[in-house]
Image (cartoon, rainbow, N blue to C red):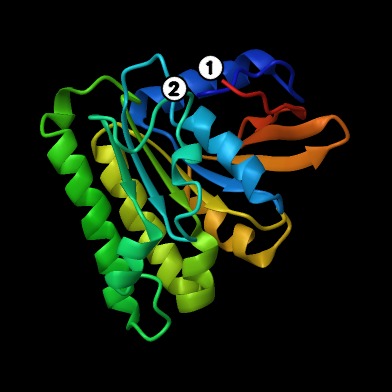
Amino acid sequence: MSSPVRSARGEGGGLRETFRELKQRGPQVLVTGDVPEAVSRRATRRLLGHPDEERHRVFALTDGDAAAERWFPGDRTPADDRATLISGGELRSSAVVDASADRDGAEDALVRRIDGEIRSRCPDSDTLPPAMLRVGLYSLETLLEAHGIETVRRLAYRLTGEVRRARGMGHYHLPRASDSAAVADLQFVFDARLELRTGAAGPEQRWHLPGRGTTNWVALDEQ
């Protein structure tokens, strides 16, 4: 994963091993926490991989186009050969976040668009190293408000399946409190959950790993 486990409740070694195991098969991460967008951007920059690393990066932004380049790490931008930004404007034109769209249409348009990028940029996905492909989405909140929990759950199953097939690392933001009903309904679709908060000293994160425990809160540092 992008962030090491510095300390944890329970068996720290077991948690670190879980991180390594997840990375090998393409971890799918639900990112939660009622935090400002700037905190979500910082988490995304880490999850998309260090700017010095060669990665295929695909990021879908459903909540608008402002400061789109600030979602990418370091000096990486959507103009890079190995980077793709699927903008909010593009998604809206496809009726993905249009409340008038039928549910199946909204779901299919987004899945097709992301799947198309994966296939075009990673045609030999079967031979890609684990986590070479990084896919992100901000946010499930927009889709949840427009289409409801059942559509978003189905969408999450389909998107995580496409990314897993390429052994990619996917992360999907739902900026709600961790005890919200939507988080409870969706978290079982994912391999892990990254929780964000704004602490006294700045943004913080902790990981929830099913069956292995939860890390302590640590600083969400920039790359």
Q: Is residue 108 left or right of residue 29?
A: left
Give percent across and percent down for residue 105: 27, 76
Q: Is residue 168 left or right of residue 35?
A: left
Q: Residue placed at 45% from the left, 46% from the top? A: 68
User: Compared to 201, does 102 lie above or below?
Assistant: below
Give percent across and percent down for residue 127: 16, 22
Give how far apart the Cα atoms at labels 1 and 2 are: 6 Å
What residue does disc 1 label? 17
Q: Residue placed at 74% from the left, 18% from the top? A: 7
Which of the 4 image quadrants contains residue 106? bottom left
User: Compared to 168, does 31 lie above or below?
Assistant: below
Q: Residue placed at 40% from the left, 14% from the top? A: 52
What residue does disc 2 label? 21
Mark 2 belongs to which amino acid?
Glu
**Around disc 1, counting alpha carbons within 10 Å, would you say few (fewer than 14), some (14 to 19), or many (20 or more)?**
few
Q: Is mark 2 on a helix, strand or loop?
A: helix
Mark 1 belongs to which amino acid?
Glu
Q: Is mark 1 on a helix, strand or loop?
A: helix
Is residue 209 at all visible to an observer of this figure?
Answer: no
User: Compared to 118, does 181 lie above or below?
Assistant: below
- Quadrant in which the C terminus appears: top right
**Around disc 2, counting alpha carbons within 10 Å, would you say few (fewer than 14), some (14 to 19), or many (20 or more)?**
few
Q: Nearer the viewer, residue 172 or 215?
A: 172
Which residue of the protein is positioned furthest toward the bottom in this rendering?
A: 100
